[in-house]
Amino acid sequence: MNRRTAEDEQQAGVSHVVQIDTPRFVGRAAELTRVVRALVASSALILVEGEAGIGKSRLVRETLAALRTHTAAADDLSAAPTTEPLVAVCPPFREPLTLGPIVDAARQRRSDVSGLGLSALAGTLRPLFPEWGDALPPAPEPLSDPGAARHRLIRALAELLDRLGVSVLVVEDVHWADEATMDFLLFLATRPTQRISLLLTYRAEDLPADSLLPRLSASARQVADSSGGHGNVRVTLGGLEPPEVAQLVSSMLDDELVSPAFAELLHSRTEGVPLALEESVRLLHARSDLVRRDGEWIRRTLDEIDVPPSIRDAVTDRVGRLSAEAQQMLLAAAVLVDAEAEPVLAHVSGLAPPEVGPALREAVLSGLIGEDEAGRIAFRHVLAARAVYHRAAGPDRRAAHRRAAATLEDKRPVPVARLAYHYRAANEMTQWGRYAEQAADLALAAGDHPTAVSLLHELLTEGGLPASDVARIAQKFPLLSVTGYLRRADVVSTLRSVLEDERIQQGDRGRIREQLGRILIHVGEHADGVEQLQRAIPDLADSPSEVARAMATLGGPVGSLWPAAEHRRWIDRAASVAESRLPEAERLVLMIDQITALLDLGEPSGWDLAAAFPAQEATSQGALNLARLSLNTADGAMQWGHYQDARRRLAIAGDVSHRHHYLRLRDMTLVTIAHLDWFTGAWSGLAERARHWVQLDDEPVMQLDSRLVLGLLGAAAGDDPTAEDAVRSVRDESTRRGIADMSMESTGALARLRLAAGDVQEALSLTDDAIEAVLGKEMWLWATETVPVRVAALIAAEHLSEAEEVVAAFARGFADRAIPSTRAALETCRALLAQGRDEHADAAAAWEVAAAAWQALPRPYYALLAREQKSFCLVKAGEGEAALSQWTEVAQGLAVLGAKKDAERVADTLQQHGGEKPGRRRAGRRGYGNHLSPREQEVVELLLSGLTNREIAIALSRSPKTIAAQLNSAMRKHGVTTRTALAVIVAQSRFGAMADTARD
């Protein structure tokens, strides 16, 4: 093929570029304006999304420069950010560093914190900032709950940023952020006061499936809506258009013209991605393929130029043209990941001192690495760093990691996560184990469970540790993070294999077995888990905390393994150990577990113990205890049928968890409120709320609970063909996991659906195990959802005598217990028996008693279904008119409730017996005149229990404005103007009604 010579090109007026400049900021003016305006106007959350190399970091740099200009020029300085924004970058470590990006940024901002006026809370920061030890307050007492520990650390770090005067926090590459960092950002975004603007960049395609970023965005918008702020600004960066490509390339070539054909070619090969454009131009320059002819820059003919198809290819090609020494310097920068000073880079490169300077200059001139404002050197883009790293030979990479670790060990504070990363990459496993455990400890202290779990998992399964180390590390494994953890089988296998070693010490064996048992129970393998806990207790004589914890776990009815009495014995033993051998803080945590277990067993003593609990919110641990106690006792009250008390307790749990940012507890509270709304007939908007929680893949209990509510709603409405499948899936999964109360409720619901479909045998089969748990093991609380449908199925199968035996055993066992929901279930069973015996008049009366018992809770859906059965009995008793009237009321009630399928069934029955179908209600709300509407009555009920408007709003899942409006309406109807007067007049009217009833 003919080739042009240099002389040919010179004669043709062709010249080559001598120097490539850094490209100007092109094509992002509108995005820059939006971001700057949001930051200047008020606190905001700004999300910058885009693929790798699209220009997110450049937009951030230009934003910060614009803010500096605005601050300098502002007449009203209060309208501008008060300090230089704090910039943090999340590194792509194999294991992320807990809160590392924020900690490193704060450390760069200030070397000494004396004089900042930090509170005692700041003592929590000592593990993160050991170099500030002399200036920080003493470390507070450790907290037993990891979530509380993380929350306290987050609050302390937020206080530090407030004292530093940070008004804008930039965090780049949040797709690599550890969970604790994301929780910290969520905390900042949802604080009602002292809000810091957040500018976050991320790649959507690299966001973990369980990332908190969507929740952060939604929560920030809610806060902004309530406070009048600007809320979210979302900027999605795309590729540059051909004219913008021409501008960018021109800015690299001394602003000379770029031919449209050249710009089109680059655009077609790079899709307008700025980094790809820059690398392509630099590579063309390195190949001498970039020429200037007749006053404009052009490309050679298409058959003479090869624009690289990817950034990696472009970088690999360019690096191959550098000297060996420059390549070593680039490998050092790629291995270090973070920006480092020149001496660190020189040591990691392994170059001789005379070679360092020239190699560094050549590497910088390549445009691949550069200096930041502090003089530290790093790759300009992580994609280029990865290309350099992966083109190097394995031995060269390991040697560089070894030198990096040796250099970083001299740093203070010791960067344990980075050292673990480098020693692992260098295949130095002993040193890796040492630093990985330290990094896991730091993650646990911050409540960053995913990072800790991943590190501890690798230590347990790959570290080749002796039994004593396995025991120590196994105890650190955060149990709440095991759910959904895909590699938990490896951990279980490792613990089992260690237990097979006969040389293991007794105490180590007990600790490993205790943790293994708790893991197994947590993932639903109850029989094996219980066995491990029982075998662990004799080996834990010198560990009262582990003994009490194991006993308390055995005390909860996690499955139908033992009779209730056996669970109660374990609860009593745990309480005895706790009382005599544990400090008060641990006793209180265990006391909540004891209360929860007792209520789950249907033991009234659980309420006495709950009343005696010293609920104090003065400390972080006290607030956590109060939130847990309120939520757990609310769940107990819901199961017992004390629905009004459950709402009151949920309001407290929601308020405390919201104010103290216990986000998971808050979410659990909201899910429980949704379930309570199903029971109480507050179905308006319930399906939408349940669908939201169903999306929480990393929270299986909340997800299953919400899926059950959705299935029950769909079955009642008849508008969801998958409703029964949803209920069945909840039943199967909750049974497998050993979530006993949910398993029982979903089993009963599925059995009712199958019985309604005429499948008597499956209804019986489904309830076989449930009836054994209730009657054989005296788990009376579970009878509410399971025994009535079992009795109905037995009667349908013509096993009336067996049904009578079941009801008699139920009545004997339940005789001395005051559990309203189970009492309503028992009355339902009695009505079923009377109906099965064809005692029509007695059955009608019994169904009315059952309906009244359900309505008293109130559980209106069950009350309406009971009155539907009452009507059948009235017909057979010769009271047709009364039956028609009752069916009419039931059909209307079911329609108002939202149980469309049931309402249509009852309406059809009514018509078949000579009645008229209830007419359709006109659109619009029912008018109540001077009487309180049902929703107003709910608000007034909670007002009488002493709740504030905000607490009532949380309990009823309504906005505070709605609650205020409903209270104002109630006050208007009663002719009063204050909350106190409303409470008094309602209480007096009830007392009067009670007195009239007594006189009658």
Image (cartoon, grey):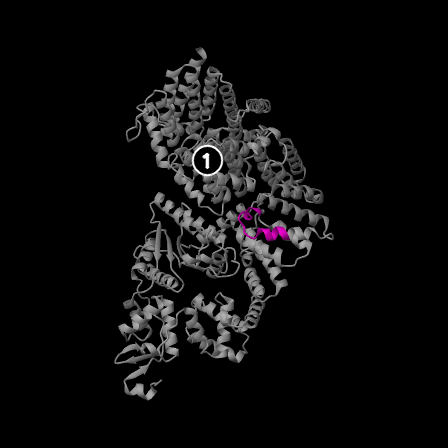
Q: Is residue 975 visible?
A: no
Up-down relation of residue 990 to residue 752 (above or below): above
Give yes or no for residue 488 being in the magenta stretch: yes
Depth order, front residue of 402/480: 480
Magenta residues, start to end: 479-493
Quarter that holds the N terminus: bottom left
Residue 20 quadrant: bottom left
Up-down relation of residue 614 to residue 906 (above or below): below
Quarter that holds the C terminus: top left
Q: In the drawing, does residue 196 fall left or right of residue 504?
A: left
- Give the class, few, some or many, for how many residues have Cα within 10 Å of label 1's Cα (few <14, many ≥20): many
Depth order, front residue of 433/857: 857
Q: Amino acid at mark 1?
A: His
- x and y percent of residue 117 in the render? 48, 51
Q: Main secondary structure of the magenta part?
A: helix
- x and y percent of residue 995 in the render? 44, 14
Q: Which residue is mark 1?
A: 675
User: Residue at the spot x=29%, y=59% of the render?
Assistant: 30
Give yes or no for residue 933 being in the magenta stretch: no
Q: Is residue 866 visible?
A: yes
Farthest top residue in view: 1000
User: Residue at the spot x=50%, y=21% of the render?
Assistant: 836
Up-down relation of residue 273 to residue 458 (above or below): below
